[in-house]
Structures are given as C-alpha cells and as structure tokens.
Amino acid sequence: MADCEEVQVEVEEPATKKARVQADIKECGENLHTVLKDFSEFQQTRILSDSSQRKTICIEGSFNNREGKAIVLLEKKPFNEEILKNTLNSNCVLQKEFSNDIYGFYEFFPSVKYSGIKTTVIYPATEKHIRKYQSQDIHLIEETPELYESVTLPHLQKEKFSLQWVTNILEHKSETDRVVFEDPSPEIGFILLPDLKWDGKQIEDLYLVAIVHQRGIKSLRDLNSCHLPLLKNIKGKGIKAIEEKYGIPCSQLRIYIHYQPSFYHLHVHFTYLKYDAPGIHAEKSHILSSVIDNIDLMPDYYQKATLPFVVKETENLFLEYERRGIVRKL
Ligand code: G7M
C-alpha cells in the first residue's frame, strides 16, 4: 500500500472538505488511517456492545464516501500518577452537584490533554469483526482431539482472520517504534510489543504480546515438545525485557496463551497481574508455565487433551457445532 502524506485539517467549507476526502481516498486507496483526523465523516449505525464495568463502547458505522462498514471502539483509560499530578490543580473545572455535611459531590473535568479516550478504529470491518465485537450469548465447548480434527480444524482452514497485521509486525512494516524486544531467531525468536489494547503508558493496565517468528503454529493445539525451546525462550526473554523496561518483576506478570485465539499465528499474552484484562478467565487462558510443564510431562499433551473454549452464538464455529448437535441455543 502506498504511503500517504499527512493532510493538515483546519476549518474547511463542507464542499472543500468533501473534495479533500475524495482526493484522499483516491490517493490513499483503502488506507483510512493515513488521513483520519476526526469523526466528522463517521456515520453511526448501531451500538454493538457497551460495558459500564469496563467503560467501553463499541459502535458500528461507516465513513462518508468509503465503502463498507467500520467499527469504533472507545475505552476510558485508568488513572495513573502522572494524570493525577497534572489534573488535581487549577487547570481543571470542578462543578459542585451537592453537599451534605462532610460529603461533597462534584463533577470533575480535567484539561483536554488528560481526558483522552483510547480509540480503536477498524476499517474496513468484516462481518467476522462485527460478530466479534457484538455482545451476545456465549457457550462453552469441550473440544476433544476428534472434534478438533473433524469440526474446528476444517472450519479454521475455511475461514480465518487475515494475519496481515501480524506479518506487518514480523516484517518490521508496522508498529516498529512500539517494539519492546526482538529475538530475530527464525526458530525460537519473537517480537514483544504492546497489545492493541494498551497505550503503553501506565503499568496498571500493562498488556504486551509476544508474536513468534516461526510461521505455521496456529494455536495451543499445535504445540508439542519441538516447541519447548521456543516457549521457554519467550518466557525467559519476555520477562527480562519487561522487567528492564517497566520495572515489573515476573511474580507480577500473568503470561498466557488464549484458546481459541482470534488470530491463528502463535502469540503469548503478558499482562499485569493486578489488571483484569479481557480474556484472562479459566475458559480462555492457559498459563504459559503450565503449558510448558504439561508438554514436559507429556510431549503430545495438547494433541491428546480435551480443550474447552468459549464461542459466541453468532460465530460460524458455533453454528458448525450446533449443526452436529454438540451445543444448542436456549
Ligand atoms: O485472542 P488472541 O489470543 O488471538 O489475541 C490477539 C491479541 O492481539 C489481542 O489481545 C488483540 O488486542 C491483539 N491485536 C490485534 N490486532 C489486530 C493487533 C494489532 O494490529 N497490533 C497489536 N499490537 N496487537 C493487536
């Protein structure tokens, strides 16, 4: 995809703006992210999910003059010391709602610099992206090795997310300035960088992923004793890199692999232990130390084990299992 010059947006006449947007599209093809400066061209269609607990909202919509759907995911950020230092002062607005005895209730407006909302834009978004971000009923499937071979694997071969973002990272085409550590070995090497879900600022929600250089390892199911050097390398060097850069000891890290993952190219998650990151529960995450230990005890453990996983009702994988009578809706 051709690189595009950044376009400075000042206040524009609507007609000028339309012409500029069309010119940007012509110049930049599908790459919305080289020109997106605000949401004036975004048309909201519906809310896909909304969590007051996680303080996130996910919106489906489209961009004027661009074909296809887009997803915008907004997430309020956790507090950290830097924000507090720079907001609890006179550069903010404090509006009193009411008071009663020693209790005062206010609405607090920090300055623009410190009230940023973490924003992810996916464009063009596929139906699979939309299903992924849509809130819906979920089911637990106990996948035996036979079910993996006869249902899950054929499904994966038929339908999977593009791995382009992974390839871009491994080939140093994207997110190069975010890389925390790289071991370039084609067999046991990996790239460690902040996950999409982490802005890399505060350790309270620290979230990194280690993406392996070796191609062809789809998921936990594929892991066997050949992969022990790779897994041990990720664990050892990942921990060291995080300790050096962020000062967090390994005893405060949660290091795990998802099953099923969303992307079928092996990657390991590193999160801060106190942070309840999405996908850390027992039905989805497998602690890396236990994975290594299981394979040490039985080299083909993950080819023999029944592995549970969670699936959403509208996912095609659910429909495959439903068709075979293994799960059913209420
Ligand atoms: O569930 P699964 O194990 O497949 O997790 C994949 C992880 O990759 C998730 O935590 C995503 O937030 C993360 N991720 C997805 N994308 C598309 C990107 C990306 O483009 N860059 C980075 N750094 N992380 C991503």
Image (spheres, rainbow, N blue to C red):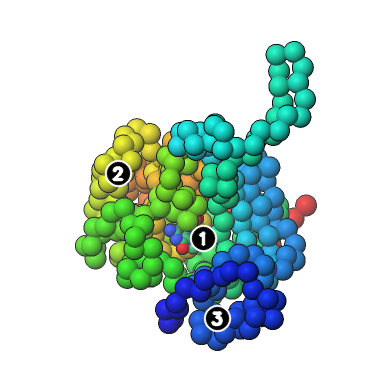
Neighbourhood count class around disc 1 (C-alpha, 10 Å): few under 14, some 14–19, many 20 upward? few
- Which residue is found at the position 34% from the left and 36% from the top? 248
Give the number of the mark in front: 1 or 3.
Answer: 3
Q: Is residue 305 left or right of residue 328?
A: left
Kindly identify the amino acid type of the residue bearing the numbered disc 2: Lys
In the foreground, 94 or 223? 94
- Residue occupied by mark 2: 245
Kindly identify the amino acid type of the residue bearing the numbered disc 3: Asp
Q: CA separation, marks 1 and 2? A: 28 Å
- Which residue is found at the position 61% from the left and 57% from the top? 73
Which of the two labelled residues, at mark 2 and mark 3, occupies the earlier sequence position? 3
Q: Relative to residue 321, is residue 139 depicted above or below?
A: above
Q: CA separation, marks 1 and 3? A: 31 Å
In the image, the residue with mark 1 has its CB under 8 Å from the nearest atom of ligand 1? yes
- Residue occupied by mark 3: 24
Give the number of the mark in front: 2 or 3.
Answer: 3
- Which residue is found at the position 63% from the left and 83% from the top? 19
Describe the element under mark 1 as helix, strand or loop.
loop
In the foreground, 74 or 133? 74
Picture quadrant where residue 13 is located:
bottom right
Query: Badges 1 and 3: C-beta atoms under 8 Å apart?
Result: no
Residue 274 in view in this figure:
no
Percent coordinates x, y for residue 309 in the rendering: 55, 52
Q: In this view, does 4 lie to the left or right of 37?
A: left
Picture quadrant where residue 327 is located:
bottom right
In the image, the residue with mark 2 has its CB under 8 Å from the nearest atom of ligand 1? no
- Residue occupied by mark 1: 262
